[in-house]
Image (spheres, grey):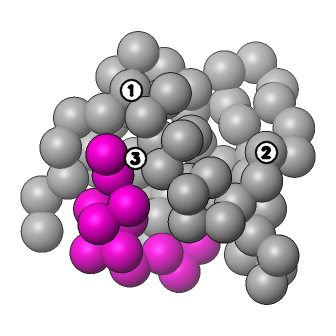
Amino acid sequence: MKLPLLSGKQVLSTLERIGFVKVSQKGSHIKMLHPDGRKIVFPYHNEVDRYTLKGALSDADIDLEDFSNALK
């Protein structure tokens, strides 16, 4: 599945809809935590690289289909 080109703001709001909470930010990277213990770190840029986002979602055990369904 190919992810659309998203901004950091869109990624942040989508992850919040999935249940993640922003924990910290260092520079342009945001760290988020899910109540079940999963963590994700992604760059908060105007355009988040698709491969970077796909890798971050994979590391956090987030299904690409679930992420795409949560997009608005």
Write down the residue under mark 1: 7
Residue type, label 3: Thr
Q: Residues within 10 Å of mark 1 (few under 14, many from 20)?
A: some
Write down the residue under mark 2: 22
Residue 5 at what x, y percent from top left? 22, 35
Q: Residue 37 falls in which quadrant of the image?
A: bottom right
Residue 26 at what x, y percent from top left? 82, 26
Residue type, label 2: Lys
Q: Are marks 2 and 3 in contact (CB under 8 Å)?
A: no
Looking at the image, is mark 2 or mark 1 earlier in the sequence? 1
Front of the two marks 1 and 3? 1
Residue that appears at 27% across and 75% down = 65
Looking at the image, is mark 1 or mark 3 earlier in the sequence? 1
Which range of residues does the magenta coloring cover?
A: 60-72
Question: What is the quadrant of the C terminus in the image?
Answer: top left
Residue that appears at 18% across and 43% down = 4
Q: Residues within 10 Å of mark 3 (few under 14, many from 20)?
A: few
